[in-house]
Amino acid sequence: EAKIFMAAAKTTQAAAMQHFFKAERTAMKIPGQEQVKPLPVKKAGVIGGGTMGGGIAMCFMNVGIPVTVLETSPERREFAIKTIRGNYEVSVKR
């Protein structure tokens, strides 16, 4: 097993993956940004109240952040509200 690992570690593919890993970490470190503090999130807006949008809205609501969900029609808005309400009801039952 060790021989196989050492052989794989010396391939060009392994070198490329290591380069990508290091580059990804370096790209996240912007010079001069070390002292920047994030602003607090006071309110949020979500476009679309489907499965993903409703879940994102719920995440904000769960931590007390007011959220506005935009939908394309009153019917879609009501469906989104019903889905979110249903998700909370399921959570309460657990």
Image: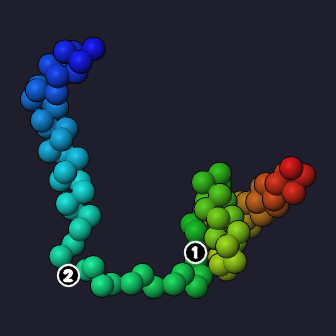
**Residue 25 vs residue 57: left or right?**
left
Identify the element where label 2 is drawn.
Answer: loop
Q: Report the amino acid beneath label 2.
A: Gly
Query: As rendered, which of 66 and 68 lies closer to the eye?
Result: 66
Q: Residue at x 21, y 62 (%)?
A: 27
> Which residue is disc 2 drawn over?
32
Color encoding of the figure: rainbow
Identify the element where label 1 is drawn.
Answer: strand
> Which residue is disc 1 drawn over?
45
Is residue 75 shown above or below 37? above
Q: Quadrant of residue 9?
A: top left
Please state the horizontal and vertical placement of residue 35, each as a whole percent of the image: 30, 85
Please state the horizontal and vertical placement of residue 76, each as a whole percent of the image: 71, 60
Query: As rendered, which of 52 and 14 lies closer to the eye?
Result: 14
Please state the horizontal and vertical placement of residue 49, each as a whole percent of the image: 65, 61
Q: Quadrant of residue 80?
A: bottom right
Is residue 77 shown above or below 52? below
